[in-house]
Image (cartoon, rainbow, N blue to C red):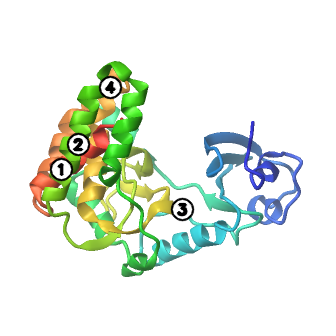
Amino acid sequence: MPWPCSAAPAWDPSWRSPWPRPVFSSAVPAELAEVSYRPTRRAVLRAVHESQVHYLKVQRQGRAAALHARHRMLLEAGLPVPVPCGDPVQDVVVLRQLPGTPLAVSVREDGAAALRPEHVLALLDALPAAALDLPARVSWTERVLDYGHAAAVALPEERERIERIAAAIDEARRETAPGPAVPVHGDLYEANLLVQPGADGPFGPVTGLLDVDTVGPGHRVDDLACFVAHLAVLPTVHDRYGCAPAAAARMLAGFDAVVDAAALRVRCAGVALPR
């Protein structure tokens, strides 16, 4: 596997670095499993040692300290993000496991009935103002023409239709108001939220907010559109997600109260197009 140079030590079970002993209180290697891998960008490994589970986020060279700082900033703001274990080592950030299961599981079971729009909004409201000083990330809808082109290349028989839809979304995006710049997650969808249906904390059943690499300045409507659009297209992934459209409709109705309804729908379309 062509790991980035900084990922190779984290994957090697014989690697001896400063982190195994303080993290697991043992020199015995942990069992490692790949969770995700984006070539030249980052990798996530799951490390199991006896009853302890941690996640290793392997960053591009020189970026681990910034991710570590983001986690600390969000923890201080009271957000349920994973707690780092010590300082980064060799571009690896070690994170403690959070309680809960991915929101996608709850969506499959009952349409995530315990999760209400106000829980998602409370989570976003808790993002600290300091996030506005972080680098901005281009939203999905702002790149809809690029994604439309990629989809057209993959489906040449639908090229004209795809490009027409992408152009219409981009035009509508320019004609709607996204609202003020605020702290955003940047990639908010069901895989990045953990829930416990019986939990009743400040964010309802939400017990974890993951993948905070994209936190920074943006527009609330883009976070909400990302969340709704991902729910809406889940049935195309697997027929077990039959309850997802109703969950998406419930969230959309709640989000309409806080952002421009037309802007929200346009951006939902922009997120759904490349899915």
Sooner in the amino-acid sequence: mark 2 or mark 3: 3
Q: Residue at x 18, y 36 (%)?
A: 246
Q: Residue at x 36, y 30 (%)?
A: 152
Question: Observer-nearest residue: 115 or 275?
Answer: 275
Relative to 242, residue 200 above or below: below
Residue 151 horizontal/vertical position (percent): 38, 32
Query: Which is more foreground, mark 3 or mark 1?
Result: 1
The residue tagged 2 is 167
Disc 4, SS: helix
Q: Are marks 4 and 1 in contact (CB under 8 Å)?
A: no
Q: In the picture provided, is 112 more to the left or to the right than 135?
A: left
- Alpha-carbon distance for marks 2 and 4? 23 Å
Three-letter code for the amino acid on which mark 4 is drawn? Thr
Cα distance between the residues tagged 4 and 1: 26 Å
- Residue carrying label 1: 171
The residue carrying mark 4 is: 236
Residues marked 2 and 1 touching at CB (< 8 Å): yes
Asked whether the beta carbons under mark 2 and mark 4 sit within 8 Å of each other, the answer is: no
